Image (cartoon, rainbow, N blue to C red):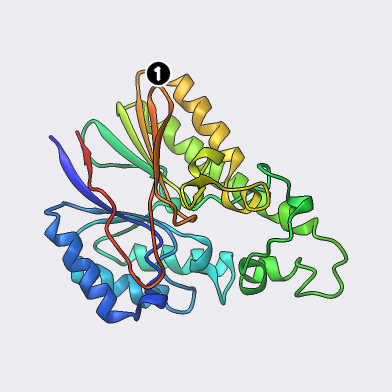
Amino acid sequence: MSKRLAWCTDIHFDSAGGEPAIVQLAAQVRARQVEGLLLTGDISTGRDIIGHLSMFERELQMPIYFVGGNHDYYHTSIEAGRRQLKEVSEISQFLRYMPTVQYLALTPRTAVVGHDGWYDALNGNWQSTNFLMNDWYKIQEFAAVFPGANRAVKTMDGIPTLARTIARAGVEHITAGIKAAVRYHKAIVVLTHFPPWPEAARHEGKISDGEHLPWYTSKMMGDMLLAAAKAYPQCSFTVLCGHTHGRWSGRVAPNMHVHVGGAEYGLPEVQPVIEVD
């Protein structure tokens, strides 16, 4: 039994004008004649995401398997943001917030696992970067340890330390989900927001430089996924992510493909349809 699923990422409804963009994107998804939607983060901001997700759900009337992105916690905290996403999913007919479940079956052969993940500053060289993330001003946990937002903090060390703690929790969740899912399924779709490998983090067609890679990738997630591909050679893996807005697809192991969705602020789009058996 095969199934067709739409995929969207970095749709940023807050930048696209809200309701008209939601209605338009839902129509584009339905036009693909799919049975569900995979959504890999940066849906809106913490102020608006519940309203935007609920409206999107009403328009689509189909399962939405989703994870959050960094923008989804702007103007709130990660803790509070994840709590509200969990709560709205618990009362929803169609919303499936993947960090709250080990895995879900898409077909008898294929399961989906997912977590936001996070960048972990282990690729590139964060100590020499002058690049600043809006996250560090707009997400409460980061603002508390960011020198630019808190004059009592003297160094940048708190940023990678916090990022790695958040990233590690995502890795642990997906590790457990894969371990549970491979007992019954031969194919796994992995949803996460941040590209797990440097070659997947593209800007204008090129791999991001060492100044951006610390905040664009999750080495911990990439190492775990490659280990899973090696540990379960009988299973095929498809990894879907976003964050960089740079479209890229590639094979990172004989049984593992990765796809990064392209995106442009103000113009949410549907990525290629994912077909699962």
| 35 left or right, relative to 44 | left
Residue 261 point in image, percent of width and height: 38, 51
Along the line of sight, the residue nearer the viewer: 163 or 259: 259
Q: Quadrant of residue 113?
A: top left
Q: Alpha-carbon neighbours of circle 1 within 10 Å: few (<14), some, or many (≥20)?
A: some
Decide if residue 197 is in sight here.
no
In depth, the one of 215 and 206 nearer the eye is: 206
Quarter-of-image position of residue 42: bottom left
Q: How many marks?
A: 1
Residue located 64% across and 65% down the image: 133
Give how far across and how far down residue 99 sits, in percent: 45, 52
Rendered position, 227 above or below 269: above
Task: Look at the numbered disc 1 and give the secondary structure of its residue.
Answer: loop
Q: Nearer the viewer, residue 215 or 166?
A: 215
The residue beneath circle 1 is 233
Task: Indicate the position of residue 15 as horizontal and vertical percent values.
Answer: 41, 76
- Could you tell me if residue 65 is visible in this image? yes
Question: Residue drawn 24% across and 63% down?
Answer: 93
The picture places residue 37, in percent across and down from the top left corner, at 26, 55
Q: Is residue 99 left or right of residue 210?
A: left
Amino acid under disc 1: Pro
Figure check: 2 above or below 134? above
183 in relation to 161, above or below: above
Q: Can you say which quadrant of the picture contains the N terminus?
A: top left
Kindly identify the residue that appears in the image at 38 percent across and 55 percent down: 262
Quadrant housing the C terminus: top left
